[in-house]
């Protein structure tokens, strides 16, 4: 699916949610979640191509999976945290969104620790 179709879907859903929010706020949140799911589902093939290309580049650069896997995991944690936080904010739950963002940051740091360890091991091997 191209960006114009994805954008049209996103704008249409946002406008419908804006109208629904005045009448039935709970239904507006459900509509946004459904539209988000459709957008992510439509982007699955593109994301798979991105992953394949990035993995090929990492392999060509000689990066080991122990270095590259934490990068992907950290990016995944960040994306999921950002999306879930946006939905919480849209539902009017800014406090929950803030706690989620804090937990997501901590988890991203924890997920990136093997990468830091690999860098330190590499530096130790050079010295």
Image (spheres, rainbow, N blue to C red):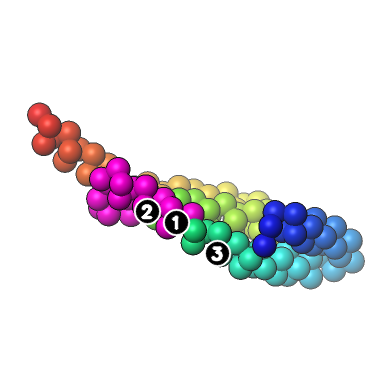
The residue that appears at 69% across and 57% down in the rendered structure is 2
The residue that appears at 30% across and 46% down in the rendered structure is 60
- Dot 3, crowdedness within 10 Å: few (<14), some or many (≥20)? few
Q: What residue is disc 3 on? A: 45
Residue 114, x across and y down, in percent: 26, 49
Magenta region, mostly helix, strand or loop?
helix
Q: CA distance from mark 3 to mark 1?
A: 10 Å
The residue that appears at 25% across and 45% down in the rendered structure is 62
Marks 3 and 1, the one that precedes in the sequence: 3
Q: Which residues are magenta?
A: 50-72
Q: Quadrant of the N terminus?
A: bottom right
Q: Is label 2 in a helix, a strand or a loop?
A: helix
From the viewer's perspective, is 74 left or right of 24? Answer: left
Contact between labelled residues 2 and 3, with CB atoms less than 8 Å apart? no
Whether the magenta-drawn stretch holds residue 68 is answered as yes
Marks 3 and 2, the one that precedes in the sequence: 3
Residue 14, x across and y down, in percent: 80, 57
Along the viewing direction, whichever of 93 and 43 lies nearer the viewer: 43
Q: CA distance from mark 3 to mark 2?
A: 15 Å
Q: CA distance from mark 1 to mark 2?
A: 6 Å
- Dot 2, crowdedness within 10 Å: few (<14), some or many (≥20)? some
Q: Is label 3 in a helix, a strand or a loop?
A: helix
Question: Can you tell which mark lies on residue 51?
Answer: 1
For residue 123, say whether it is visible.
yes
Q: What residue is disc 2 on? A: 55
């Amino acid at each position: 699916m191209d960006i114009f179709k994805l954008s049209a879907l996103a704008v249409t859903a946002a406008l419908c949610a804006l109208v629904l929010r005045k009448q039935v706020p709970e239904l507006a949140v459900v509509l946004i979640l459904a539209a988000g799911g459709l957008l992510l589902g439509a982007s699955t093939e593109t994301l798979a191509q991105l992953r394949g290309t990035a993995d090929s580049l990492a392999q060509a650069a000689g990066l080991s999976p122990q270095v590259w896997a934490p990068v992907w995991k950290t990016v995944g944690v960040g994306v999921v945290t950002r999306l879930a936080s946006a939905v919480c904010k849209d539902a009017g739950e800014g406090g929950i969104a803030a706690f989620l963002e804090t937990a997501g940051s901590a988890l991203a740091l924890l997920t990136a620790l093997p990468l830091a360890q690999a860098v330190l091991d590499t530096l130790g091997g050079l010295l």
